[in-house]
Amino acid sequence: QVQLVESGGGLVQTGNSLRLSCAASGRTFSEYIMGWFRQAPGLERELVAAVSRSGYGTNSADSVKGRFTVSRDNVKNTVYLQMNGLKPEDTAVYYCAASSSGSWPTTHPFSYTYWGQGTQVTVSS
């Protein structure tokens, strides 16, 4: 079992930044690929960014490339999502998730076993 707790969401204006954190506990954090997903009302959950077990590999959605950066600290058992240049269309509930998949990149929500409770990000225009 892995427990995931997100933090760092909030209300910001267009162009501002937020950093989301996801603290993991339970089994060995470095055994899992970590992903950030988001879900806006009426839309499907989508991958925002993922980071490999070592942290050297990352994969991001085209909509956030150049603005969002995913990283992890395997000592602190934490994964981060730095979000710069936020836009109203980034408004969603953001979830972190852990995957034990053997393939990379791992982009589908079905490949992720453990999920946090989500944190709301709202970007006003």
Image (cartoon, rainbow, N blue to C red):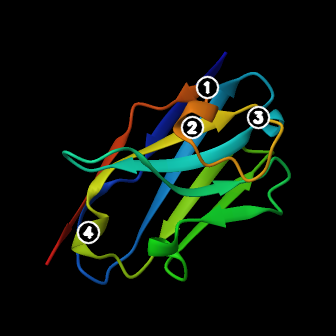
Q: Secondary structure at mark 3?
A: loop
Asked if residue 13 is positioned above or below residue 122 in the image, the reply reads below
For label 2, the crowd category at 10 Å Cα-Cα, with few meaning under 14, some 14 to 19 and many 20 or more, is many
> Nearer the N terminus, badge 3 or badge 4?
4
Tell me if residue 53 can be seen.
yes
The residue pinned by badge 3 equals 101
Q: Secondary structure at mark 1?
A: loop
Measure the C-alpha gap from mark 2 to mark 1.
7 Å
What's the amino acid at mark 2?
Ala
Measure the C-alpha gap from mark 1 to mark 3.
9 Å
The residue pinned by badge 4 equals 89
What's the amino acid at mark 3?
Ser
In front of the other: 27 or 56 = 56
Asked if residue 54 is positioned above or below residue 110 in the image, the reply reads below
What's the amino acid at mark 4?
Glu
2 and 1 marks in contact (CB < 8 Å): yes
The residue pinned by badge 1 equals 113
Q: Secondary structure at mark 2?
A: strand
Pick the quarter of the image with the C terminus: bottom left
For label 4, the crowd category at 10 Å Cα-Cα, with few meaning under 14, some 14 to 19 and many 20 or more, is few
